Amino acid sequence: MKTTLDLIRANPTGRVTLKIGVSIAGALVVTIGIVLIPLPGPGWLLVIAGMGIWAVEFHWAKRLLGFTRRHVQGWTRWATTRPLPMRFALGSVGLVFVAVVAWLSLKYSLGIDVVARALRYLATN
């Protein structure tokens, strides 16, 4: 049974058009993801989604996506087999890391130092 992609790839013009469209769409999503990585939000998720778009047409992207999936699943399996106190510690370290990245992102990209503002607020009230 032929899929829509098989039918598109069967035509030389469709094959080139598909490759160009996938290239542009994947590049756009990956670029937006890379821009968003230092900011709080779904930066890495968008990078992985862009890789998924590229994986439709490019073998190297499919291999890289598989590599990423295997390592994320391995990390998840490892973390979920740890005792509860260790999982809380891992989660706490993760939250601290995200908080520091968010603080530094706001401070250096938007000029908003939330820590200094919070300390100033606590000192005056």
Image (cartoon, rainbow, N blue to C red):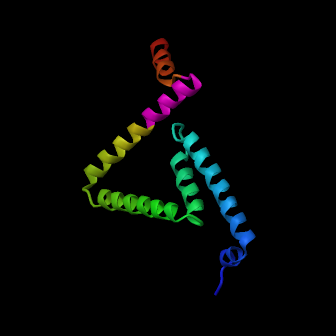
Given the current orientation, which residue lies at the most extreme bottom position? 1
Question: Magenta region: which residues?
Answer: 99-112
In the image, is 117 to the left or to the right of 90?
Answer: right
Q: Position of residue 4 (x, y in %)?
A: 69, 77
Quarter of the image where one finds residue 99: top left
Q: Is residue 100 magenta?
A: yes
Given the current orientation, which residue lies at the most extreme top position? 124
Q: Nearer the viewer, residue 15 or 28?
A: 15
Q: Is residue 73 magenta?
A: no
Given the current orientation, which residue lies at the most extreme right position? 13
Q: Nearer the viewer, residue 16 or 45?
A: 16
Q: Position of residue 55 (x, y in %)?
A: 55, 64
What residue lies at 48% left-to-right and 15% top-to-bottom? 120
What residue lies at 44% left-to-right and 64% top-to-bottom? 66
What residue lies at 54% left-to-right and 29% top-to-bottom? 106
Q: Is residue 76 above or below residue 14?
A: above
Q: Nearer the viewer, residue 21 or 43?
A: 21
In the image, is 15 to the left or to the right of 119?
Answer: right
